[in-house]
Image (tube, rainbow, N blue to C red):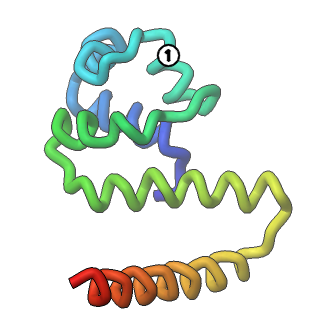
Amino acid sequence: MKKHFGEYIKQLRNEGGFTLTQLGAKLDLDSANLSKIENGKRDFNEKSLGKLASVFKLDINKLKTEFFSDIIAKKLYQNGCSTDALIVAEEKVKYLKKINLKQTEVDL
Protein backbone atom coordinates (compact mmCIF):
# COMPACT_ATOMS: atom_id res chain seq x y z
CA MET A 1 0.00 0.00 0.00
CA LYS A 2 1.37 3.41 -0.91
CA LYS A 3 -0.98 5.50 1.18
CA HIS A 4 -1.11 6.18 4.89
CA PHE A 5 -3.23 3.98 7.10
CA GLY A 6 -6.00 6.57 7.42
CA GLU A 7 -6.39 6.72 3.65
CA TYR A 8 -6.60 2.93 3.66
CA ILE A 9 -9.44 3.10 6.19
CA LYS A 10 -11.21 5.71 4.06
CA GLN A 11 -10.90 3.46 1.01
CA LEU A 12 -12.34 0.53 2.97
CA ARG A 13 -15.17 2.71 4.29
CA ASN A 14 -16.07 4.01 0.84
CA GLU A 15 -15.90 0.56 -0.76
CA GLY A 16 -18.04 -0.80 2.06
CA GLY A 17 -20.63 1.95 1.61
CA PHE A 18 -20.31 3.31 5.15
CA THR A 19 -20.64 6.93 6.19
CA LEU A 20 -18.16 8.34 8.71
CA THR A 21 -20.86 8.11 11.37
CA GLN A 22 -21.73 4.49 10.57
CA LEU A 23 -18.15 3.25 10.59
CA GLY A 24 -17.29 5.38 13.59
CA ALA A 25 -20.10 3.72 15.55
CA LYS A 26 -18.77 0.27 14.66
CA LEU A 27 -15.27 1.29 15.81
CA ASP A 28 -16.44 3.23 18.90
CA LEU A 29 -15.19 6.51 17.40
CA ASP A 30 -17.08 9.69 16.71
CA SER A 31 -17.18 10.80 13.10
CA ALA A 32 -14.91 13.82 13.74
CA ASN A 33 -12.11 11.62 15.09
CA LEU A 34 -12.54 9.10 12.28
CA SER A 35 -12.32 11.94 9.77
CA LYS A 36 -9.06 13.12 11.38
CA ILE A 37 -7.68 9.58 11.16
CA GLU A 38 -8.64 9.30 7.50
CA ASN A 39 -6.97 12.65 6.77
CA GLY A 40 -3.75 11.77 8.60
CA LYS A 41 -4.27 14.32 11.39
CA ARG A 42 -4.69 11.67 14.08
CA ASP A 43 -3.35 8.15 14.44
CA PHE A 44 -5.54 5.07 14.49
CA ASN A 45 -5.53 3.22 17.81
CA GLU A 46 -3.80 -0.15 17.63
CA LYS A 47 -6.37 -1.58 20.05
CA SER A 48 -9.09 -1.05 17.42
CA LEU A 49 -7.44 -3.20 14.75
CA GLY A 50 -9.54 -6.22 15.70
CA LYS A 51 -12.77 -4.24 15.28
CA LEU A 52 -11.61 -2.89 11.93
CA ALA A 53 -10.69 -6.38 10.75
CA SER A 54 -14.06 -7.70 11.88
CA VAL A 55 -16.10 -4.95 10.19
CA PHE A 56 -14.39 -5.46 6.84
CA LYS A 57 -13.67 -9.20 7.21
CA LEU A 58 -9.93 -8.66 6.84
CA ASP A 59 -7.08 -10.94 7.83
CA ILE A 60 -5.84 -9.44 11.11
CA ASN A 61 -2.21 -10.27 10.32
CA LYS A 62 -2.34 -8.44 6.98
CA LEU A 63 -4.03 -5.51 8.70
CA LYS A 64 -1.30 -5.43 11.36
CA THR A 65 1.30 -5.41 8.59
CA GLU A 66 -0.34 -2.36 7.01
CA PHE A 67 -0.73 -0.61 10.37
CA PHE A 68 2.78 -1.17 11.73
CA SER A 69 4.49 -0.52 8.40
CA ASP A 70 2.79 2.88 8.42
CA ILE A 71 4.10 3.65 11.91
CA ILE A 72 7.63 2.52 11.00
CA ALA A 73 7.65 4.52 7.76
CA LYS A 74 6.50 7.68 9.57
CA LYS A 75 9.19 7.33 12.23
CA LEU A 76 11.94 6.74 9.67
CA TYR A 77 10.79 9.72 7.60
CA GLN A 78 10.41 12.06 10.61
CA ASN A 79 13.89 11.22 11.83
CA GLY A 80 15.62 11.32 8.47
CA CYS A 81 16.66 7.66 8.64
CA SER A 82 17.67 5.65 5.62
CA THR A 83 15.87 2.49 4.66
CA ASP A 84 18.93 0.61 5.95
CA ALA A 85 17.17 0.89 9.32
CA LEU A 86 14.60 -1.57 7.99
CA ILE A 87 17.28 -4.19 7.37
CA VAL A 88 18.67 -3.75 10.87
CA ALA A 89 15.16 -3.87 12.36
CA GLU A 90 14.44 -7.11 10.53
CA GLU A 91 17.60 -8.63 12.00
CA LYS A 92 16.54 -7.48 15.46
CA VAL A 93 13.10 -9.03 15.06
CA LYS A 94 14.73 -12.35 14.15
CA TYR A 95 16.99 -12.04 17.19
CA LEU A 96 14.04 -11.30 19.50
CA LYS A 97 12.13 -14.29 18.15
CA LYS A 98 15.17 -16.49 18.72
CA ILE A 99 15.56 -15.28 22.30
CA ASN A 100 11.85 -15.76 22.95
CA LEU A 101 11.99 -19.30 21.56
CA LYS A 102 14.93 -20.14 23.83
CA GLN A 103 13.15 -18.63 26.83
CA THR A 104 10.05 -20.69 26.08
CA GLU A 105 12.16 -23.86 25.93
CA VAL A 106 13.71 -23.01 29.32
CA ASP A 107 10.28 -22.40 30.87
CA LEU A 108 9.07 -25.83 29.74
The answer to whether 52 appears left or right of 70 in the picture is left
Local packing at callout 1 (Cα closer than 10 Å; few below 14, some 14-19, many 20+) is some
Residue 16: image location, x then y, percent: 21, 30
* 57 versus 29 height, above or below: below
Residue under the image location 24 percent in, 34 percent down: 51
* 88 versus 71 height, above or below: below
Residue under the image location 76 percent in, 57 percent down: 77
Residue under the image location 45 percent in, 86 percent down: 99
Q: Nearer the viewer, residue 38 or 101?
A: 101
Position of the C terminus by quadrant: bottom left
Residue 34: image location, x then y, percent: 45, 20
Q: Mark 1 points at which residue?
A: 33
Residue furthest out toward the front: 107
The answer to whether 69 appears left or right of 47 in the picture is right
Does dot 1 land on a helix, a strand or a loop? Answer: helix
The answer to whether 66 appears left or right of 73 in the picture is left
Residue furthest out toward the right: 80
User: Quadrant of the rendered structure where residue 90 is?
Assistant: bottom right
Residue under the image location 57 percent in, 28 percent down: 39
In this rendering, the count of numbered labels is: 1
Residue 6: image location, x then y, percent: 49, 36
User: Quadrant of the rendered structure where residue 45 is?
Assistant: top left
Q: Nearer the viewer, residue 44 or 108?
A: 108
Residue 8: image location, x then y, percent: 42, 42
Amino acid tagged 1 = Asn
